[in-house]
Image (tube, rainbow, N blue to C red):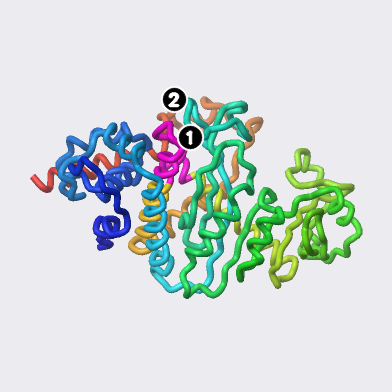
């Protein structure tokens, strides 16, 4: 219904010698395996022998993995720019489905993608899991209410958190439809630098960014006048000008007393209190700014989904430009699936999210209090046989995709 192949043919043009596959067919041949949960290009080779898949997708036959990889490696830089603009055009339509929008909330974050070869542009940087390993550090911008991947930029692993953020903000602003009247941003302390804040203030947007707790700001916290926000927390606000800022900005602070259970507190502790602080230009109360920023926690499962289910962790080539193009392909696949869920399956997706939330809310038994396998089996009247091996959700999705193709093939026959 989207006429996606015609849309890509109009907006992505790349003359090539080998015309066996058009550019739009090659892009879709990269998109389909990602949607099916096949995280590597080589894993899509079984689609070459599936006539039903080729019939449903309209492909004459499916390209082999080497053809797909050569397409990425030989693509010029202008192809990435064209695909980026095509993704932006699709988003300008998707954002108003299934209902018209007048406000956008954009969350900024980055993630670490470890590489295990000699990929171009991969550098040693912050890597909490594989210390000392080379990596990429993609910069992501996600629209909070719709979960669309609004923009993405591939960066070397040693890039600073906010490095490249002004350019990404420029493209994000340019991609906003004219119908949007209100634009809000949220980001963690890695983006709390003057170039990022200044770029947000130059456009008609509001923001709440975690404040960098420098020594002058820490000295300011204890002298603020706090008011009770709830049973545990109290809030305050003030004007603060950090070193390098051209002007003072509004600071919102929340604090609570340190509890005995806070053995390893993740918040900043000073004296008897734990502190959180944000720099903002929003006209909300301090408690309102605090609760608005807490909605940014939803970006974590989105990034996890991109990494585990949309091949973000898999680096297909050794070329930085080719990998940047593949990131745009991932963005296209992710937004297509998200638009389908929001438009065609809103009730089903809402039920799945509700079930997942309820599952996460279940209490977890501590290891010291957990019953042994034999005692648990005796209590339930079951045998003590080992439990079945848990399968990864991506494996289940691949199995369902293959089963669906086999079912469609039998029906066609």
Q: Are marks 2 and 1 in contact (CB under 8 Å)?
A: no
User: Residue 406 location in percent, x, y?
Assistant: 19, 41
User: Residue 218 location in percent, x, y?
Assistant: 85, 51
Question: Residue drawn at (17%, 47%), measured in percent from left and top?
Answer: 408
Magenta part of the protein: which range?
305-327
Q: Is residue 320 left or right of residue 123?
A: left
Question: Residue drawn at (58%, 28%), measured in percent from left and top?
Answer: 130
Distance of label 2 from label 1 (alpha carbons): 14 Å
- Earlier residue among tags 2 and 1: 1
Question: Residue drawn at (40%, 33%), measured in percent from left and top?
Answer: 317
Mark 2 or 1, closer to the camera? 2
Q: Give the label on residue 380, or none.
A: 1
Q: Is residue 62 left or right of residue 411?
A: right
Question: Residue 322 colored magenta?
Answer: yes
Examine the rendered structure and indicate whether residue 214 appears above or below residue 321: below
Which residue is label 2 attached to? 386
Mark 1 surroundings: few (<14), some (14-19) or many (≥20) residues within 10 A: few
Would residue 195 be visible to someone looking at this image?
A: yes
State the image quarter where residue 327 is shown: top left
- Secondary structure state at the residue bearing disc 1: helix
Examine the rendered structure and indicate whether residue 181 appears above or below residue 343: below
Examine the rendered structure and indicate whether residue 182 appears above or below residue 73: below
Question: Residue drawn at (52%, 52%), measured in percent from left and top?
Answer: 358
User: Residue 173 location in percent, x, y?
Assistant: 53, 64
């Amino acid at each position: 219904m989207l006429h996606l192949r015609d849309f890509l043919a109009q907006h992505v043009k790349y003359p090539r010698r080998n015309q066996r596959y058009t550019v739009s067919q090659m892009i879709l041949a990269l998109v389909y395996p990602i949607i099916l949960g096949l995280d590597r290009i080589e894993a899509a080779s079984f689609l070459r022998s599936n006539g039903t898949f080729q019939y449903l997708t309209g492909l004459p036959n499916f390209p082999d993995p080497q053809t797909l990889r050569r397409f990425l490696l030989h693509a010029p830089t202008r192809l990435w720019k064209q695909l980026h603009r095509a993704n932006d055009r699709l988003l300008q339509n998707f954002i108003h489905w299934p209902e018209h929008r007048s406000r956008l909330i954009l969350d900024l974050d980055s993630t670490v993608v470890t590489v295990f070869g000699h990929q171009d542009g991969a550098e040693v940087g912050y890597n909490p899991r594989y210390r000392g390993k080379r990596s990429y550090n993609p910069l992501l911008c996600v629209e909070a209410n719709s979960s669309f991947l609004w923009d993405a930029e591939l960066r070397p692993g040693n890039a600073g958190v906010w490095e490249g953020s002004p350019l990404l903000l420029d493209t994000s602003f340019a991609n906003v439809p004219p119908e949007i009247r209100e634009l809000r941003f949220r980001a963690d302390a890695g983006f709390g630098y003057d170039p990022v804040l200044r770029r947000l203030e130059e456009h008609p947007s509001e923001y709440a960014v975690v404040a960098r707790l420098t020594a002058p700001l820490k000295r300011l916290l204890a002298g603020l006048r706090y008011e009770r926000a709830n049973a545990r927390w109290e809030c305050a606000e003030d004007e603060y000008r950090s070193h390098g800022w051209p002007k003072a900005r509004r600071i919102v602070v929340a604090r609570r007393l340190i509890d005995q259970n806070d053995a390893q507190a993740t918040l900043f502790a000073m004296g008897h209190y734990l502190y959180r602080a944000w720099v903002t230009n929003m006209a909300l109360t301090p408690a309102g700014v605090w609760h608005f920023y807490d909605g940014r926690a939803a970006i974590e499962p989105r990034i996890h989904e991109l990494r585990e289910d949309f091949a973000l962790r898999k680096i297909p080539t050794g070329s930085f430009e080719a990998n940047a193009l593949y990131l745009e392909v991932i963005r296209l696949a992710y937004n297509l699936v998200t638009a389908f869920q929001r438009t065609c399956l809103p009730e089903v997706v809402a039920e799945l999210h509700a079930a997942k939330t309820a599952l996460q809310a279940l209490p977890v038994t501590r290891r010291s209090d957990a019953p042994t396998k034999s005692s648990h089996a005796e209590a339930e009247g079951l045998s003590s046989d080992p439990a079945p091996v848990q399968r990864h959700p991506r494996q289940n999705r691949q199995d369902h995709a293959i089963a669906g193709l086999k079912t469609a093939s039998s029906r066609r026959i």
